[in-house]
Amino acid sequence: MDQLYALSVTVPLVAAAALLATRPLLAGHRRVLDVVAVLVSAAVAVMLGFLVFRTSGADSTYWFAGFRPAHGVVIGIDFEAGPLSAGLACLGAVLMTASMVFSWRYFTHVATYFHVLMLTFLAGMTGFCLTGDVFDLFVWFELMGVSAYALTAYRPEERGPIQGALNFAITNSVGAYLSLTGIGLIYGRTGALNMAQIAAYVNHHPPSGLVVIAFLLIITGLLVKGAIVPFHFWLADAHAVAPTPVCVLFSGVMVELGLYGIARMYWSVFGVALGHQAAISHLFLALGSLTAVVGALFCFRERHLKRLLAFSTISHAGMFLAGFALLTPLGLAGAALYVTGHAFVKAALFLGTGIVLHRLRSVNETWLHGRGRRLPVTGVIVTAAAFGLADLPPFGTFLGKGWIEDSAAAPWLTAIFIACGVLVGGAVLRVAGGVFYGLGDPPGEDPQMAAEANEEKGETEEGRQRTPLSMLIPAAALAALGLAAGIAAMVPKVAAGVETAAARFQDQPGYIATVLAGAHVTRAAPPYPVAPADVTVASVVTALCSVLGAAALALAALYWRRLPLLRRGYEPGAGLTVPIRRFQSGIINDYITWLVAGVATLGGVLALVIR
Amino acid sequence: MGIFPFLVVAWIVVVGLYGIVTSRDLIHQIVCLIVVQSSTYVLLLGVGYVTGGAAPYFWDIPQHTRAVDPVVQALALTDVVVEAAVTALLLSFAVQAQKKFGTLDPSQLVEFKG
C-alpha cells in the first residue's frame, strides 16, 4: 500500500518516457496516445483519492528506499500525505483526466509531446503536493514549470503564445531561483533539507534574521506561481494563449499549488519560529485582499474570454490567500473547499470557452454576442458554472467563502469578498447572458482588445456542426462536481472532517512527530481556536447578496446603453484604458521590476514586523 | 572564507536582475537569467565549503578526514540540469520570437496588454 506514494509520480513519468520512446511506432495511432494519457491520469486520481481516505485519520509518511530518519536526523527523502495535500494532488489528477478527455476531439492534429508534457506536468503537481523535502519542492516546482512553459507555447507558430510563454517562463524562473537561494540559506543554517527537521532546528534556536530572509525568498517563487499582486502579471498573458485543456489545469490547480506551497512552508516549517502571528496574518490578509480587488477589476473590463477567466483566477487566488492568512482551522478549511469548488466551476467555464472556440472560432465577447444561441447545451453548462463562480448556494464556492467569512468575522473582509464576487460573477454572467442568450447589446469594444481576441484561431479545427460529446461531458461533469462538492460539505460529518484535516495541517509539532518519529497523530492540538464549520445564516445571506449583485451588474452591463439617464455613447471606464495598458504592459522587464519591488517591500514590512 | 562568498552571491543576483530589467535584447535577457541562477551555485558551494576539507570521496582517504559537504554538490548538479532545460526551452522560444515578431527587443514582443 505504501507504494502508492511512489507510484503516483512514477506512473505518469514512466508513461511519458514510454510514449516518447515509442514515438516512431505511434505515428498515425493518435488514439493510443489519448487512451494512455486518460488512463494514466485516471489511475493517478484513483491512487491519490485512496491516499486521501487512508490519511483521513492521521497523516502518514513514505520514505524512499526505506531510508528512515534516526534520532531526529533525516538522511532519506520522504513523501508526506494528509487529506489536504493528497486531496489537492487528487484534484489536479481529476482535472487532468477531464482535460485529456476533452482533448480527444478538440485537436485535429496533436503532437506526441502534448501528451508527454501533460503527463510530466501531472507528475510535477503530484510530487509538489506530497514532498516533505524543501529541495525536492524546488525540483518538482521546476518540473511542473518547464512542462507548463512548453505547453503554453504549444502553438509556436503564433505570436501570442510566444509572448505568454516567455513572460511566464522568465518571471517564474526568477521566482524559482530566489526560492532556491532561500533553500540554500536555510540549509546552510540548519544542515537539513527535510521540512520537519528544519522546523525542529529553527524552533529550538534563537530567532535570527537569516531565517526570516530564507522564508521571504522561499515564498517569493510561490507567490509568483500563486499570482499574488504584484507578482501576478505573467498569469493573464500565459492563460490567454495556452491551449484550453491546459488552461483548465493552470487556473484550476497550478496557481493554487503556489498558495499551497506557502501554506506548507508557513505551517510545517517556519510558522512557530517566526512568531508574530497577528502581524503575519494581517500582512497576508492585506496581500490577499489587494490581489482579489485588482483581479476583479481587470476581470470585469475584459472582453477576451480566456483573459477574463484568467483575471478572475487572480481575484480568487487573492481570496484563497486571505483564507489561509486567517491562520485558523476554519479559514484553512474554507480555503480548501473554496479551491475545490472553484477548480471545478472554473474548469467547466474554460471547457465551455473551448467549445465556443471550437464551434464559433472566436473568444471575443463582443463578436460572439448572441451567436452562442446555436450552442444551447454549452450555454446551460456555462451559465450554471458562471452562477457557481458567483458563489450561488449550494456550489462549493459558496460554502468555502462562507467559512472564510465566518472565521474572519470582520465586516471589511466580507465587504471585499462581496465586492469581488459581484465583479467577477457579474463579468462571467454578462458573458453567459450575452453570448448564449443574446441579452441586451454587445458590450463596447476596445479595438486593441478585439484584435487580440481575433488572434485566437489556430488552436482547434474548423468550426464543426455538432459539439462532440467528448467535449460536453467533461464540462458538464465538472460543473456537477462543483455542485457536489458544496452539497457534500454541508454534511456535518464531512465539514468536521475537513476542519480536522485543516487543524492537522496547521499542527507543526504533530507534523514533526509524524515525519521524524513515525508517530500516528490523529487529533491535532490546535494552536488556533476551532470554530464549528456550519452553514450559517450570515454566509447564506452574504452569498445571496453577492449572486444578486452579480446578476444585477451583468444585466446593467448588458442593457447599459438602453438606460435613459445616460448620454449616448458613454462608455464607463474608457478613460482608464491607457493607465491600465501601461500597468499590465506585457513587457518582461516591467514584470521583473514589479517582482523585485514586491520582494523588497515584503522584506521591508517583514523586517519591521519581526524584530 | 566567512561572509565573502555570500557577498558575491548578492552581487551576482543584483547584477543579473539589473540585466533582466534593463535588457533590450531577448538573448541578452536569457543570459542574465542564467547569471541570476549562477548565484545559486556559488551560494550552495559556499554553504558546503569547509576550510581545508578534502573532496568527499572516501575511497583513498581515511574515513574521518575533514571533507566539504557532498550534499550541496549534488544540489548544484541538479540545479545545472534544471538550468539546461530552462535555457534550452527559452532559447527555442527566442528563435520563434525572432521568426514571428521579426525582432528580439522585449518591449516589441507584445501581442497582449492591458
Image (tube, helix red, strand yellow):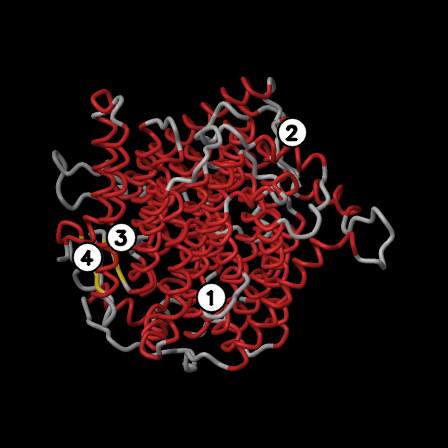
Let me know if residue B104 appears in the view.
yes
Q: Which mark is residue A119?
A: none
Q: How crowded is mark 4: few (under 14 residues within 10 Å), some or many (20 or more)?
A: many
The three-letter amino acid code for the residue at tag 3 is Ala
Residue A292: percent from left, percent from top: 59, 59
Q: Which label belongs to residue A62?
A: 4
Separation of marks 3 and 1 at Cα, in angstroms: 25 Å
What separation in Å lies between label 3 and label 4 (alpha carbons)? 18 Å
Residue assigned mark 3: A45
Q: Residue at x 76, y 47 (%)?
A: A576
Q: Are marks 1 and 2 on the same chain?
A: no
The answer to whether residue B2 of the structure is visible from this angle is no
Secondary structure state at the residue bearing disc 2: helix
Circles 3 and 4, Cβ within 8 Å, touching? The answer is no
Quarter of the image with the C terminus of chain A is bottom right
Location of mark 1 (residue): A324
Is A523 located above or below residue A28 in the figure? below
Q: Residues within 10 Å of mark 3 (few under 14, many from 20)?
A: many
How much space separates mark 1 and mark 4, taking CA atoms? Answer: 26 Å
The answer for how far apart the CA atoms under marks 1 and 2 are is: 37 Å
**For the residue labelled by badge 1, is the local secondary structure a helix, a strand or a loop?**
helix
Q: Do labels 2 and 3 share a chain?
A: no
Residue found 30% across the figure and 39% down from its top: A119
* Pointer 1 with pointer 2, Cβ within 8 A: no
Give the numbered dot on residue B107. 2
Q: What residue type is labelled 1?
A: Phe
